Image (spheres, rainbow, N blue to C red):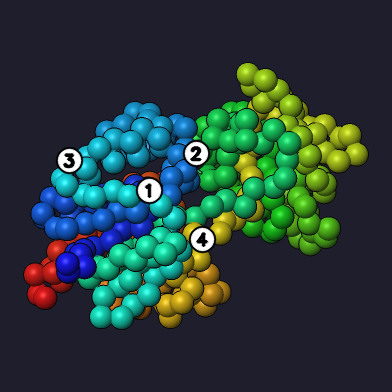
Amino acid sequence: MTEQIYDCIIIGAGPGGLQAAIYLGRYNRNVLLIDRGGGRTQHAKHIENFLTQKAISGKEIIETGIEQAKSFNVKIEHGLVTKVLKSEFFEVYVGDKQYLSKFVIVSSGVYDNLPPIERLHKFLGTGFFTCIDCDGYRTTNKKLVIIGNSIKTVHLAIAMKEMFTKDITIILYADKVPDEYKEELKEESIPLIIGRPVKITGEEKMEAVELKGEQRIECEVIMSHFGYKLNDGFLSELNIKRDSNGFKFIVNHNYESSLSGLYIVGPLNQGNDQAVIAAGEGAVAAIDIKKRLLER
Ligand SMILES: Cc1cc2nc3c(=O)[nH]c(=O)nc-3n(C[C@H](O)[C@H](O)[C@H](O)COP(=O)(O)OP(=O)(O)OC[C@H]3O[C@@H](n4cnc5c(N)ncnc54)[C@H](O)[C@@H]3O)c2cc1C
């Protein structure tokens, strides 16, 4: 029995991976999509910046996308990819199970660094947000607390004030804040607290955030700013170029990485982290793979 060699294996069923799967499926290519479930888009409860969708949950985008991909004969397997190697073909491992493929699209996304605050997950995606592009608008004219641990959090607070709400308190984990930033926040009338939030209160709606030492700040929404990590552990045995910080992967205009045949779409590359952008990148990668398969 000859071992099956896929035209393309896609790792991750978020908007990036699913859009690529739909394109490649519609080229009648032999495609396997592997996903472990529970990605970042699943936490997006209220997406309202996706063309034609006035408001849709991330879960619905994924579920509909999976059905759509299946209808074009994309094979979908539930599993955690643990390793990718390259020899004559790409070898993609789910534990001991090996799959071979001519091309690979990595669309495994990122995960947020969330601070250890009690009852955070009750409000994640409804009142506790992590992304200005996704949910800044939903803080419009609301009582907002911004928490973070870097000077970038100060920049975020000033941007939020200009676009969304004047009622902002900033809580920084940092021990020291340079004087010029304190001055800037003072000029903007944004109160600064140095402290550790420990609990969010409220049932139907968020009421306040409690800090270590019993201080309590009333708020309706929270924007958290601690960055994110990449779901990229399975690429560790491949030599793929990253940016000067050794963080994000460098890709070309078709989203191909420095390793020929391996494409990286979504927030793992240097582009912006948005569902519609990940989907667009998935389409571009798939169209390029279509051409490369024809050349072969
Ligand atoms: C709370 C919240 C709100 C958001 N709101 C918006 C919004 O309003 N508008 C917007 O455009 N964007 C929004 N986003 C961002 C959007 O979800 C991301 O841009 C999008 O997730 C990127 O898509 P992706 O396909 O790259 O990755 P993801 O959606 O993260 O999907 C990656 C998939 O890969 C899987 N995976 C990871 N590692 C492995 C592995 N080793 N093996 C197998 N599978 C793996 C994951 O489980 C997941 O299913 C929001 C995000 C969050 C968290």
Question: In the rendered structure, are the residues bearing label 3 and label 4 in contact, judged by CB atoms less than 8 Å apart?
Answer: no
Q: Earlier in the sequence, mark 3 or mark 2?
A: 2
- Image quadrant holding the C terminus, namely bottom left
Vertical placement of residue 101 versus 21, above or below: below
Q: CA distance from mark 3 to mark 2?
A: 25 Å
Identity of the amino acid at label 3?
Ser
Label 1 CB less than 8 angstroms from ligand 1: no
Disc nearest the viewer among 3 and 1: 1
Q: CA distance from mark 2 to mark 4?
A: 16 Å
Q: Earlier in the sequence, mark 2 or mark 4?
A: 2
Residue 136, x across and y down, in percent? 53, 39
Query: Which residue does the image show at 83% across and 60% down from the upper left?
Result: 176
Residue at image mark 1: 78
Identity of the amino acid at label 4?
Leu
Q: CA distance from mark 2 to mark 1?
A: 19 Å
- Dot 2 surroundings within 10 Å: few (below 14), some, or many (20 or more)? some
Question: In the rendered structure, are the residues bearing label 3 and label 1 in contact, judged by CB atoms less than 8 Å apart?
Answer: no
Disc nearest the viewer among 3 and 2: 3
Question: In the rendered structure, are the residues bearing label 1 and label 4 in contact, judged by CB atoms less than 8 Å apart?
Answer: no
Residue 71, x across and y down, in percent? 17, 40
Disc nearest the viewer among 2 and 1: 1
- In which quarter of the view is residue 293 placed? bottom left
Identity of the amino acid at label 2?
His
For the question of whether residue 221 can be seen, the reply is yes
Q: CA distance from mark 1 to mark 4?
A: 20 Å
- Image quadrant holding the N terminus, namely bottom left
Q: CA distance from mark 3 to mark 1?
A: 17 Å
Identity of the amino acid at label 1?
His
Residue at image mark 3: 71
Residue at image mark 2: 43
Label 2 CB less than 8 angstroms from ligand 1: yes
Q: Earlier in the sequence, mark 1 or mark 4?
A: 1
